């Protein structure tokens, strides 16, 4: 864009290339002669290599024969004496720029009572200041930063700055912009300022957790902090807050358990909390007026303030989030962070764009911001300082907040090398930390072979993926409400379900190296709940029949090879009243309905029994493709409405030598032949589940309703 006071505009688009845009009205169609003036007053001729006629503007690509010193001001002159400041352009997206300015040291505000050291990476800036604001007196102090190597600017401010608010003022391309520190670990209300704090005051020891020997041992329960605690009958005092997850022995309608007690009672091993880094879309001063899932990231290393009891106190959100995490862990439940490193809330307003314009995001071949995420910007994780920021942030959340896993939102936007490095970082701290995400292949300008998509799963061992193949074969297409999968009564995808049950491993025509790469699910916060999908696709059936179908689907999730994933409330038929994208819907739509939970205690007990069953025998939790190939065999021929499989010779994995699982999707009775002609003990049928025998059968079993049967033979 041309400045009103300039006849043309000039951009550094490569280390030795300047792009100059000249209006035809000015140049009259003649090719100008350009020179470059250095900060020292020297002038060098520029050679026009190519030119383009863009209608009202001529575009010239000029070659320089001298290196540019970033952080200094250069001016372009034409033969008529007109001038334009050389703007930093697409050069920031070149490998040469990345190599020149990669910095592997610390960034942010390092506090001690004696001094605070500020460091920010701003290689294209010509000047940087830190603006210090006393929140009590509102007085300000502006401190200039000194430029070091690798584009890092620093200032050491003496004295105790604890509680001081701060912003960076950065001058790039002759424009001053103010930005919150991208490495800020504390922010003021609504994330308006960074805050200098003493994190040591918030630290506590991580509680001792039971061992997690394999990702397949995890049972993930996805929940939103506000949803889980906000219901008026939750019995929870701190509704919608971090502290709501810390309250013991809370009771809801009919004296049934809620909150933390319910999580422990259910038996899940992990809770995956929807984003709790600082996000936009909710006014922290009055959060009741707005709702948001949290996929509007603002500040990645500071907690969200709307979940804190006092969002005006920067310590409140930190202490309360840590207390929530540690309380869950003290009850044996690990905590997974939903991490949104694929995009920022609003690119133009982000600290990234204000501090190093054009660097942190992907652009297409025409210089337009990429939008594979669908929200207006794609984070360029393949660039070295973007990758460093992601890795530093992951390490920070593990070391400072003791999180036990990461769910990467739209992980397919990120690059393979970054995700490999994430796995390496967490392995060095705690190899049991889970890393998984959405591996969808989205239209971002990154070569397909470099994307962290499901198609590239073989390049990312020990990183798992949400398995949409599993989801859609069991439930039916998420995006076609009337489409029905196996659990909804359509057996056309029966063979696909068998692949999904087998961990979707390559030997079984799947896509994964091992079963620990598949996250098996039929419902999440996205799209319709399973119950709402059932009401649309199977509305002709009775409510009781639809409940059987949902229990069948949940049983398939919990008994299949891989990592099972439940959406909170799935076990008692959660509804969002038919809304398929409730990201900003009110609490009345999104809240966990504890009254509904109290009305379905027997259904919850069924899911609890399935969880106990999965935990009781490692044959449901194989970790390798080889184990599946050695022990999992489907019983064929079988009726179209039946999927039956035999876990054979599995006595080394648990209390039973052989296990048979039968999934049946119709009301009509079917007879299923049992191998070996010996006595089999039924421990699960359509209404009851667990590890205790219910009755015994020989030779065959009649499955006479929609549901799941599990039969075992003693060692």
Image: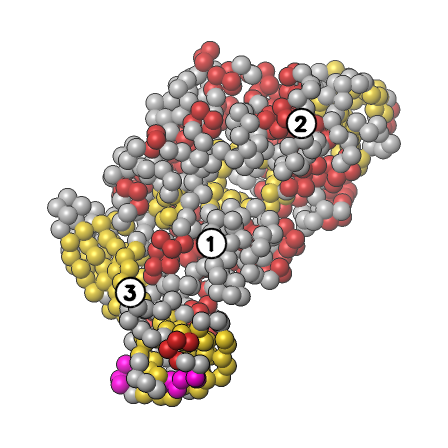
Q: Earlier in the sequence, mark 3 or mark 2?
A: 3
**Quadrant of the image containing the C terminus:** top right
State which quadrant residue 100 falls in: bottom left
Q: Residue 412 at x, y = what percent? A: 57, 52
Q: Contact (CB < 8 A) between labels 3 and 2?
A: no
> Residue drawn at (51%, 49%), measured in percent from left and top?
374
- Residue 6's place in the image compared with 667, above or below, is below
Secondary structure of residue under mark 1: loop
Residue placed under numbered mark 3 in the picture: 175
* Magenta region, residue range: 30-41
Q: Which mark is residue 377?
A: 1
Q: Residue 40 at x, y = what percent? A: 26, 84
> Is 709 or 81 nearer to us in this picture?
81
Residue placed under numbered mark 2 in the picture: 537
Number of marks drawn = 3
> Residue drawn at (47%, 54%), measured in percent from left and top?
377
User: For the residue carrying disc 3, how many other residues have a C-alpha within 10 Å: few (<14), some (14-19), or many (20+)?
Assistant: few
> Residue drawn at (52%, 62%), measured in percent from left and top?
364
């Amino acid at each position: 864009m041309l400045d009103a006071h300039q006849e043309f505009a000039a951009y550094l688009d490569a280390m030795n290339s300047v792009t100059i845009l000249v209006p035809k009205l000015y140049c009259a169609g003649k090719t100008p002669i350009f020179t470059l003036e250095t900060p020292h007053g020297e002038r060098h001729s520029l050679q026009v290599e190519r030119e383009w006629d863009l209608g009202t503007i001529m575009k010239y690509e000029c070659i320089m024969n001298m290196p540019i010193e970033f952080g200094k001001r250069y001016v372009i002159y034409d033969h008529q004496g007109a001038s334009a400041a050389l703007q930093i352009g697409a050069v920031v997206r070149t490998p040469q720029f990345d190599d020149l300015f990669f910095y592997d040291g610390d960034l942010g505000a390092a506090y001690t009572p004696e001094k605070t050291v500020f460091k920010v990476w701003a290689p294209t800036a010509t000047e940087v200041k830190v603006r210090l604001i006393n929140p009590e007196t509102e007085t300000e102090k502006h401190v200039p930063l000194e430029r070091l190597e690798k584009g890092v600017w620093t200032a050491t401010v003496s004295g105790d700055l604890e509680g001081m608010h701060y912003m960076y003022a950065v001058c790039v391309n002759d424009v001053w912009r103010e930005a919150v520190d991208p490495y800020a670990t504390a922010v003021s209300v609504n994330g308006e300022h960074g805050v200098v704090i003493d994190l040591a005051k918030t630290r506590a020891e991580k509680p001792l957790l039971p061992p997690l020997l394999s990702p397949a041992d995890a049972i993930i329960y996805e929940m939103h902090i506000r949803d889980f605690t906000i219901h008026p009958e939750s019995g929870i005092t701190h509704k919608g807050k971090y502290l709501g997850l810390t309250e013991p022995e809370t009771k809801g309608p009919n004296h049934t358990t809620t909150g933390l007690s319910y999580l422990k009672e259910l038996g899940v091993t992990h809770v995956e909390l929807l984003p709790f880094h600082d996000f936009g879309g909710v006014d922290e001063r009055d959060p009741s007026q707005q709702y948001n899932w949290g996929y509007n990231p603002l500040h990645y290393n500071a907690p969200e303030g709307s979940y804190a009891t006092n969002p005006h106190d920067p310590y409140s959100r930190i202490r309360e989030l840590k207390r929530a995490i540690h309380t869950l862990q003290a009850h044996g439940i690990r905590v997974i962070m939903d991490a949104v490193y694929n995009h920022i809330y609003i690119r133009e307003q982000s600290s990234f764009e204000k501090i190093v314009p054009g660097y942190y995001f992907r652009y297409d071949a025409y210089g337009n911001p990429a939008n594979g995420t669908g929200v207006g910007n794609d984070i360029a994780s393949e660039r070295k300082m973007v990758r460093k920021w992601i890795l530093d942030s992951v390490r920070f959340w593990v070391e400072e907040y003791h999180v036990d896993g990461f769910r990467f939102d739209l992980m397919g936007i990120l690059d393979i090398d970054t995700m490999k490095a994430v796995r390496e970082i967490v392995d060095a701290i705690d190899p049991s930390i889970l890393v998984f995400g959405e591996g969808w292949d989205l239209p971002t300008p990154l070569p397909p072979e470099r994307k962290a998509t499901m198609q590239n799963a073989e390049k990312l061992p020990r990183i798992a993926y949400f398995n949409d193949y599993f989801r859609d074969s069991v439930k039916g297409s998420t995006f076609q409400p009337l489409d029905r999968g196996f659990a909804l009564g359509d057996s056309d995808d029966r063979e696909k379900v068998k692949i999904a049950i087998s961990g979707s491993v390559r030997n079984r025509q799947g896509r994964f190296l091992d079963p620990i790469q598949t996250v098996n699910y039929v419902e999440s916060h996205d799209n319709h709940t399973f119950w709402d999908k059932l009401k649309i696709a199977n509305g002709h059936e009775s409510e009781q029949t639809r409940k059987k179908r949902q229990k069948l689907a949940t049983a398939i999730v919990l008994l299949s090879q891989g990592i099972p994933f439940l959406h909170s409330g799935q076990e008692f038929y959660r509804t969002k009243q038919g809304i398929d994208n409730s990201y900003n819907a009110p609490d009345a739509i999104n809240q966990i309905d504890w009254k509904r939970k109290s009305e379905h205690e027997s259904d919850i007990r069924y899911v609890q029994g399935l969880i106990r069953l999965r935990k009781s025998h490692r044959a449901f939790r194989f970790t390798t493709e080889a184990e599946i190939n050695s022990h999992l065999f489907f019983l064929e021929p079988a009726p179209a409405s039946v999927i039956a499989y035999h876990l054979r010779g599995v006595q080394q994995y648990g209390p039973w030598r052989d296990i048979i699982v039968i999934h049946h999707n119709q009301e009509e009775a079917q007879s299923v032949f049992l191998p070996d002609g010996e006595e089999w003990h039924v421990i699960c049928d359509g209404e009851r589940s667990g590890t205790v025998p219910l009755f015994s059968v020989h030779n065959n079993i009649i499955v006479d309703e929609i549901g799941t049967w599990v039969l075992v033979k003693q060692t």
